[in-house]
Amino acid sequence: MSDKTFTVNLKLLENYLFQIDFGEFGNLLSDEPEPLGGGEGPSPAGLLAASVANCLSASLLYALRRHKEDPGELTATITGRFGRVEKFLRVTDFDVQIRLGTTKDALPSLEGAVAQFENYCTVTQSVRRGIEVNIEIIDSAGALVHRSTTTQE
């Protein structure tokens, strides 16, 4: 068991609208989409997707910076899908595309960084125990740098 912890507090405001308190980082509203909620904030599934994409992007950036390399303007897009699992609606998979702001040729250590970065991502490696996460890294010229897929058993 780890001795590192974190705490996030939630408060129901109305219907399915929650205030999420991140302490010193402020508050965020989250709501279920219509017809269940009012769609007044990102859904819990959207927050999960943002966490996966953010963690992967930060992990790739960390791996590149360890080699003193700059990927330029790094962006990411994540698409999630819902499906029925044992009769209940679940997030079944995510497709993540990370785009580098430079070409792969401008990053001599890219191959080594890409080989390691997924292991640095605490969120994705935790989520992958139940949700398939497929990752592509594309450079600024549109060349595929990396592709990985996890398949749930």
Image: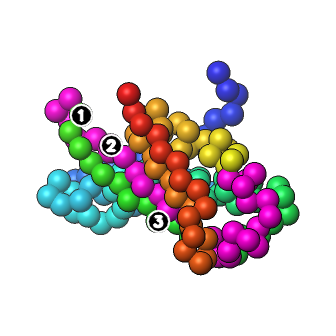
Query: Cβ–Cβ below 8 Å for labels 1 and 2?
Result: yes
- Is residue 89 found inside the magenta-colored segment of the image? yes
- Is residue 50 found inside the magenta-colored segment of the image? no
* Residue under pointer 1: 85
The numbered mark, 1 or 2, whose residue comes first in the sequence reads 1
In the depicted structure, whether residue 104 falls above or below residue 82:
below
Among the 4 quarters of the image, the one containing residue 91:
top left
Mark 1: which secondary structure? Answer: strand
Q: Image check: 85 left or right of 65?
A: left
Q: Which residues are magenta?
A: 86-114
Q: Whole-percent x and y of residue 128?
A: 48, 38
Q: Whole-percent x and y of residue 47?
A: 43, 55
* Residue under pointer 3: 77
Q: Amino acid at mark 2?
A: Thr
In the depicted structure, whether residue 32 falls above or below residue 124:
below
Q: Image check: 85 left or right of 64?
A: left
Q: Is residue 132 visible?
A: yes
For mark 1, does the 10 Å Cα neighbourhood hold few (<14), some (14 to 19), or many (20 or more) residues? few
Q: How far apart are labels 3 and 1 at the CA level? A: 25 Å
Q: How far apart are labels 1 and 2 at the CA level? A: 8 Å
Q: Amino acid at mark 1?
A: Val
* Residue under pointer 2: 92
Which quadrant of the rendered structure holds the C terminus? top left
Foreground residue among 117 and 55: 117
Query: Cβ–Cβ below 8 Å for labels 3 and 2?
Result: no
